[in-house]
Image: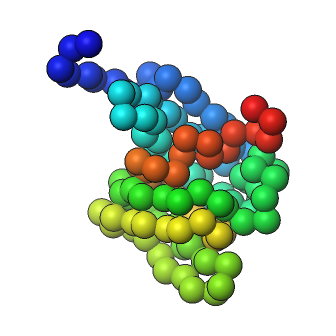
Amino acid sequence: MTGIVKKSFDAADETRPFEDGKGRLDLVTGERGAVGRAVFEPGWQWSKHIKPLAGTDSCEASHVGYVVSGRMKVVMDDGDSTEFGAGDYMEVKPGHDAWVIGDEPCVAVDWTGFVDYARPTGS
């Protein structure tokens, strides 16, 4: 194996579309695992567009990432909430819902939570 690896999210190893065309997840896989870039379109909400794929009541992924553009609100199952925007580092534990705020897509890169994200149940 070479000491340098270069991959592009624009030519991802795997792409998973979200329900109703409300975005997609692009995954690239390296020696240390997968990294994902998600594009959440305006109107996207986890409970509407990922829940049918996940089959859980709330998002059970743990996210560590960076918001490239757009805005997203995250509400934990216990009611705690915050908004993330371009330039924000984020850590979100399992047990939450989330949705895009505004008319701009929210683009986020995640190092931990996207390996199984938006994977249809049973896949």
Q: Position of residue 34 (x, y in %)?
A: 45, 36
User: Where 44 sits versus 123, above or below?
Assistant: below
Quarter in which the N terminus is drawn: top left
Residue at screen point 62% across, 42% down: 116
**Who is closer to the viewer here, 64 or 89?**
64
Count of labels in the image: 0
Q: Position of residue 25 (x, y in %)?
A: 56, 40
Please indicate whether residue 91 sits to the left or right of residue 105 in the image. Answer: left
Quarter in which the C terminus is drawn: top right
Residue 33 occupies quadrant: top left
Please indicate whether residue 78 sits to the left or right of residue 4 in the image. Answer: right
Instruction: Indicate how the structure is coloured in the image.
Output: rainbow
Q: Residue furthest left?
A: 3
Residue 39 appears in view: no
Residue at screen point 44% across, 22% down: 11
Q: Position of residue 52 (x, y in %)?
A: 82, 51
**Who is closer to the viewer here, 21 or 91?**
91
Q: Residue furthest top?
A: 1
Residue 73 occupies quadrant: bottom right
Residue at screen point 49% across, 33% down: 27
Please indicate whether residue 14 sits to the left or right of residue 19 in the image. Answer: left
**Who is closer to the viewer here, 3 or 72?**
3
Q: Position of residue 49 (x, y in %)?
A: 74, 53
Residue at screen point 78% across, 59% down: 56
User: Where 98 sits versus 2, above or below?
Assistant: below
Residue 78 appears in view: yes
